[in-house]
Every structure is written in structure tokens, then in C-alpha cells.
Image: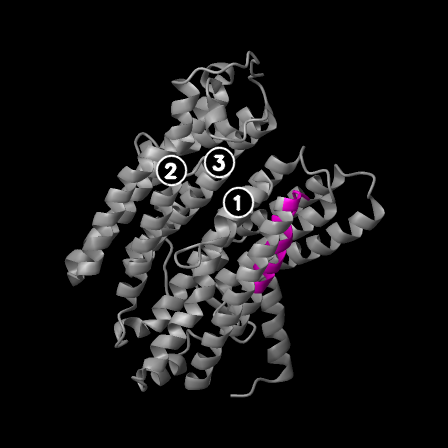
Amino acid sequence: MVQSLTEQLDSIRMGITMCFSEVVLSTGILLMLLGGLLFRKKPSTFPLLAFLIILSSLLFFIVQAQQFDVPVKLFNGMLRSDDFSTYLKILFDIAGVLTLAMSWRNQKNHPSEFYALVLAVLLGAHLLVMSMNMLMVFISLELISISSYVLAGFAFTRKGAEGSLKYFLFGSVASAVMVYGFSILYGMTGTLDFSSSVFVEQLLARNSPLVLMAGLLATVGFLFKISAVPMHPWAPDVYEAAPMPVIAFFSVVPKLAGIGVLTKFLLALSLFGQSVYDWQMIIGVVAILTLTVGNFSALLQKNPKRLMAYSSIAQSGFLLVGVVAFMPQGVQFMLFYATVYLIMNFLVFISLQYFESKGIKSIEEFSGTGVQFIWSSVFLLIGMVALTGLPPTGGFTGKLFVFSSLWEAYQLSEKPVLLWLLVFGLLNTVVSLFYYLRIPYYAFIKSGDSQERQNFLTPENLLSLVLVILILALFFLPGMLMGWINKITFVL
């Protein structure tokens, strides 16, 4: 049915209203670039402006929370507003605020461009988790990727430029492969809307291996964005070369955005359980490989940034476990773990940034820091324990929830791959203990030479203390968060 001009204008007006957060971020990018021309000599202006922009985006979700209970298609189905995407967007904005806190005092080179790029990544992440159209998915991913390529080189060093170039080359190949997969799917279905009934019906009518090939090619871009095997080799070099706030940002926002859209896209590819190809098994194998490669590679690292790069790869495997369950409860537990992952990852990176400012850039150089910088070392220890998944931290609760959903999925389907994923996940949790606790081992067991003493009331310590309280609260009182997450309905 053809809409009248008035109906189309009303639809666009409603879309802009529901996308107020994205409009704010878009406006903020323009203001940031304009401010770079007018207030170049006042660098302190830019983080404050960026903070107000992200805060405005967050306040919109809080004030208009009731509007996201029912899914609403926007701009002729290109985007969809629902509580699943809204929750992830709140996580993105919180990660943006934490990134600003880490870079507030340290980002001296081209601050307006830096914060404009951070806002651009946030905008791309917002649009990506709302996307229901393959073209919109590609555009959103490219907005995230191109901004990330530039941010990766913001250390302005030779190694930073090399890492940024590797990231760009690898990402360009991944994007090309993904869009080729999208083009094949479009050719077979005649629609770009992967949530439509036409998409499902056309793929059901075809049992050709081309469907499997197109699906695998299309998922390449998502696996690249979440740094899952086999699209992970870029991560260690980029993490080692980029500034600490940037890699903390990379480890959370693009990863969670990729996980969010991958969850929806896999449900469409599986044709709601009617596909002749077992996508649950395919992603289960990817999760097993991601867990194993990430954890065992991390054992060999001597640089804390590279260690955290492989940790990020392994954590992608744990996030994929919630996706593999293919159950509403699995998705909800994945959201809980994503929240915990954001908090504990930023806690570790904030502590590592403090130690880096003291000239500590290798794991062995942490010797004796447990005495010299006791509070930062304790906070780093808690973050590492949480990433391992040990009590009394929210990391334990998150992994317990994710594995319980996987076990429930196995009992319902009795697929061997789910049992193997559960076994490998538990074994890899044990393996991770040996590298996550290496830095605390050097800090508290080994003795160091430096006599420098820590200033207890540093901004890093105060921010870390808040994150530690949240991590402990999510262990003792997980119902506070799960009560909210349980209200989220995941539908395609």
C-alpha cells in the first residue's frame, strides 16, 4: 500500500523523535568539529562538551523509557527501536562516559577530532543495534570501523601508525567479504530486510549450498568487529599500539554492538529453527575456537596490553555462549554478562593506565607495585579476578548465568556441540586463571626497586572504587540488574 505524503512525513517525524539520541550524537559530532576550529586554544572545552552530549543521550533513554517497551519500526523498517537495542545503547553511552574520564587529562593532541571520533563510534554502535536492513548494517559497521581506524593511531607513534594501518587493511577485507555475502542474500531473497517474512520464505524455498556460503560470508564482518576467531589477528597489534582509553573503548563498544546485531542476524539466518543448516553448531564451533585461541595465546604474553587483547578475544567467546543458546533467557544472561564485562574491563584498563603513567609497561615491571601502589594494585587484582570469573565478583555471576543457559539449551536439544562448548568454556576459565593473576603475582609476591609511594586520592582510584563497588554488588545482589533485564523481550 502506497503511503500518502502526509503519512510519510509523519513517519519520518516519528522516526526522528524516536532517534533523538542519535540526532544528539550527530549534532555533537558537528559541534565538536566546529569547536576545533573556533576553540583550538581551549582543549578543556572538548571533553566537557562530549560529556554533555553523551549525558543528553543517556537522559533521553531514562526520560522516555516507556516508549521502548514495544518494538517500533522506523524509516520504512531500516531501523527498529526496542528495549533490547535500547539497553545496549545505554551500555555504549556509559562506556563513552568512562572513556572520557580516562582521556580527560591525557588527550592533548587534536582533542576535538578525538572526541568527534568517539561520538562517531557511539553513533555507529547505536545505529547498528537498531538496524534491521543489511544496507543499514553495512553503513553502521563502516561508521564504527572508519572512526576506529583513525582512533587506533591516536598515539601518534610509528607503532601506532602501523597498528592503525593493519586494522584498516584487515577491516577493509572483512567489510568486502561481508558485503559480498549480503549481495548474495539480496539476490536470493529480493529484500534487504532480514527480519521480513519475505527473507525467511525465500531462503526456505532454497536448499542450495549458496545459502550457507552467503551466510558465512555475511557473518565475517560481525566476527571481525567482536574480534572472534578467525577474524581476530588485528587485535593484539592494535591494542599494543593505541592509547589506553582507546583500547578500553574498543574492547567494549564495537564488540557489544557486533554481538547485538549478530544475535538478530543469526536468528534470521536460522529461519527461526527451520533452516537445513545448523547455525547453532557453526557459531558454537566459533565460540570454542575463540575461547581456546584467546586464552592459550594470552598465556604467552609479556605486555599487559597484548594480554588484554587476547583476553578480549576470549571474552568474545563467553559472550557468544549466550548467543549460541538461541533462547530468550540466553540473550538476557548475555546482556547481564555484557554489563559486567563493561565494568570489569574498564576497571582493569583504568588501573593499567595509571601504572603506564608511572612507566610500567611490561608484566615483569609490576614487581613490588602491590607495596608501592597498594590501592591501584588491589583494584587491578579485583578486576582480574572478575575477568577470570571468580567470586565474590559479578564476573562469577555472569559466567554462571551464561553457562546455566547453555546447559538448559543442551538439555532441550541434546546437541553435542553445546556440551562440548560447556566443557571447553569451563576448562578455559581455569586456563584464564594462570594469565589473569600473573600481574597480581608480580605486584604482591615479587619485590621491586622503586620507593615511590602512591597518592591515595587520585581520580583513577576514585573511579576504580566506584567500579569495584558495582562489581561486588552484582555478585551479592544480581537481582537488581536481572529484574530490569528480565523485562527485555528479544524478538526479531
Per the image, the residue denoted by label 1 is 239
* Whether residue 46 is situated above or below residue 189 in the rendered picture: above
Look at the numbered discs 2 and 3 and tell me whether their residues touch, using CB distance below 8 Å: no
Quadrant position of residue 138? bottom right
Q: Nearer the viewer, mark 2 or mark 3?
A: 3
Q: How many numbered marks are there?
A: 3
Q: Sort mark 2 into few (<14), some (14-19) or many (20+) by Cα contacts within 10 Å.
A: many
**Marks 2/1: CA–CA distance:** 17 Å
* Whether residue 116 is situated above or below residue 146 in the rendered picture: above
Q: What residue do we see at 48% from left, 16% from top? A: 448
Which numbered circle lies on residue 387? 2
Q: Nearer the viewer, mark 1 or mark 3?
A: 3
Q: Amino acid at mark 3?
A: Asn
**Marks 1/3: CA–CA distance:** 10 Å
| Magenta stretch encompasses residue 305 | no
Q: What residue do we see at 60% from left, 41% from top? A: 243
Q: Amino acid at mark 2?
A: Leu
Q: Sort mark 1 into few (<14), some (14-19) or many (20+) by Cα contacts within 10 Å.
A: many
Mark found first going from the N terminus, 2 or 3: 3
Per the image, the residue denoted by label 3 is 303
Mark found first going from the N terminus, 2 or 1: 1
- Residue 356 location in percent, x, y? 57, 30
Q: What residue do we see at 48% from left, 36% from top? A: 303
**Which stretch appears magenta?**
142-158
**Marks 2/3: CA–CA distance:** 17 Å
Relative placement, left or right, of 455 versus 36 is left
Element on which disc 2 rests:
helix
Q: Amino acid at mark 1?
A: Tyr
Relative placement, left or right, of 441 versus 414 is right
Quadrant position of residue 149? bottom right
